[in-house]
Image: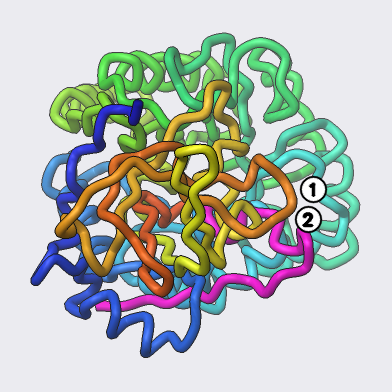
């Protein structure tokens, strides 16, 4: 029995029963790339998502892209010209952000366990460091003396609440992320004593949420917490990163997030902040929501096998390229991503089939008993919702097959 179908993708048209990506038919795109598997990201879908957000959100809200969702340099450069800032989580990501042309003033660096060399790199570059421990404060004081540059810092706060129903909880309770809210006043006092340049707060409570009411509650609580903590700050708050949390639908039965309530709630926060945090820049930081639906993963059917009545399409792809689609990147109960036979989307015949890779593990499963067009050797399998946490979040060296290519089209 196959599971219920996914809704069709609203972003990739089908012409002559073939998927079109960036204005190019999938077979032609595969020919141009030169080999499978590959990830393809559509510039027009990226632009449409940003335009949708700009239209919905208050103009005072600054939009930042979290590079960890997809660090492909060409994609980051495309985003850098369209968003207000970039958020990085490593020195390599920092280099990509700066190479993309984003001003250091609009780049922030977050993540637990930053190395001394990473902190020094960030200070020299002039980007904002989201400090996540008292150790980082000590190191930044030493680095400031060494390089002769006053570090720009914000405090990443581990709040005393979480984003309800989020796919990944990043705050609330014991966490490796940020400084516990109750310890932030002490951290602010140390920032002043160590001569660091305080600029604001970063409060990220969770991600991948499709419930507008939960996101609104988290943003409101983050704002209220920031106002409370600002009373202990050594200088006015210049920047308040409210996090993000906006999710995209992956699985049957999920509906796209309703932006309307989120935008209305942010508009109220903007009005309140004008009085309580005058001059502060309000930021939402998004990764998956900006790029996730703009990407597809494409692999080729190498073999068609029937085992005791079950059809297996064995491809040249797999979990080593796309761990998330295999269900091994945070799923508790495995569910299928949206999948189609990209060069024959509807097909003359339909069947229930499983799409697998060629790795020596039963975990290498891209689609489990899905309703698909009947496929043969050489056909192209497409996994949608693959623009975020795809190639870069996968164990590419597992079994030493070649990595997947990436291309930006449109």
The answer for how far apart the CA atoms under marks 2 and 1 are is: 7 Å
Q: Residue at x 33, y 28 (%)?
A: 3
Q: Residue 43, located in which quarter of the rendered image? A: bottom left
Tell me if I can see residue 66 in this picture: no
Residue 190 % position (x, y): 79, 30
Q: Is residue 309 above or below residue 72?
A: above
Report the front residue among 42 and 175: 42
- What residue is disc 1 on? 114
- Horizontal relation, residue 296 to residue 68: left or right: left
Q: What residue is shown at x 12% (from left), y 48% (from top)?
A: 55
Answer whether labels 2 and 1 touch (C-beta < 8 Å). Answer: yes
Mark identifier at residue 119: 2
In the picture, measured across the screen, residue 396 lies left or right of residue 38, that is right
Was residue 396 drawn as part of the magenta stretch in this picture? yes
Q: Tag 1 or tag 2, which sits nearer the N-term?
A: 1
Q: Is residue 81 above or below residue 336?
A: below
Q: Residue sitting at 21 percent across and 59 percent down?
A: 345
Q: Residue at x 25, y 54 (%)?
A: 373
Quarter of the image where one finds residue 392: bottom right
- What x and y, as percent, mark residue 48? 18, 58
Residue 332 position by quadrant: top right
Task: Name the front one of labels 2 and 1.
Answer: 1
Residue 401 seen in this snapshot: yes
Q: Nearer the viewer, residue 308 or 161?
A: 308
Dot 2: few (<14), some (14–19), or many (≥20) neighbours within 10 Å?
many
Residue 165: percent from left, percent from top: 43, 15
Mark 1: which secondary structure? loop
Q: Which residues are magenta?
A: 389-410
Magenta-colored stretch includes residue 238: no
Q: Nearer the viewer, residue 257 or 244?
A: 257
Label total for image: 2
């Amino acid at each position: 029995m196959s599971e219920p179908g996914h809704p069709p993708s609203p972003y990739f048209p089908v012409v002559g029963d073939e998927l079109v990506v960036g204005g190019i038919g999938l077979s032609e795109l595969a020919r141009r790339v030169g080999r499978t598997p590959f990830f393809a990201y559509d510039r027009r879908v990226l632009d449409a998502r940003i335009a949708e957000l700009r239209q919905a959100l208050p103009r005072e809200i600054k939009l930042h892209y979290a590079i960890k969702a997809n660090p492909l340099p060409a994609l980051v450069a495309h985003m850098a010209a369209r968003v207000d800032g970039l958020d990085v989580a490593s020195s390599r990501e920092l280099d990509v952000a700066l190479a993309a042309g984003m001003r250091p003033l609009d780049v922030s660096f977050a993540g637990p366990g930053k190395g001394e060399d990473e902190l020094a790199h960030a200070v020299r570059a002039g980007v904002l460091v989201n400090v996540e421990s008292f150790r980082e404060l000590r190191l930044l004081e030493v680095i400031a003396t060494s390089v002769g540059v006053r570090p720009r810092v914000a405090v990443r706060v581990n709040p005393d609440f979480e984003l309800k129903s989020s796919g990944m909880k990043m705050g609330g309770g014991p966490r490796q992320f940020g400084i516990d809210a109750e310890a932030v006043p002490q951290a602010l006092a140390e920032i002043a004593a160590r001569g660091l340049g305080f600029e604001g707060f970063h409060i990220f409570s969770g991600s991948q949420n499709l419930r507008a009411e939960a996101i609104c509650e988290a943003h409101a609580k983050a704002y209220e917490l920031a106002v409370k903590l600002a009373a202990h700050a050594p200088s006015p708050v210049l920047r308040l990163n409210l996090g993000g949390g906006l999710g995209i639908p992956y699985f049957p039965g999920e509906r796209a997030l309703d932006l309307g309530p989120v935008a209305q709630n942010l508009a109220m926060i903007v009005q309140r902040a004008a009085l309580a945090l005058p001059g502060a820049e309000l930021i939402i930081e998004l990764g998956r929501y900006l790029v996730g639906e703009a990407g597809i993963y494409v692999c080729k059917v190498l073999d068609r096998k029937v085992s005791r009545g079950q059809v297996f399409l064995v491809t040249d792809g797999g979990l080593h390229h796309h761990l998330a689609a295999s269900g091994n990147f945070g799923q508790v109960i495995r569910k299928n991503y949206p999948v189609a036979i990209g060069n024959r989307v509807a097909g003359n015949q339909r069947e229930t089939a499983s799409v697998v890779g060629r790795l020596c593990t039963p975990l290498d499963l891209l689609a489990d008993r899905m309703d698909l067009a009947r496929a043969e050797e050489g056909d192209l399998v497409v996994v949608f919702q693959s623009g975020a946490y795809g190639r870069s979040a996968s164990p590419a060296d597992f079994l030493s097959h070649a990595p997947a290519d990436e291309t930006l089209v449109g």
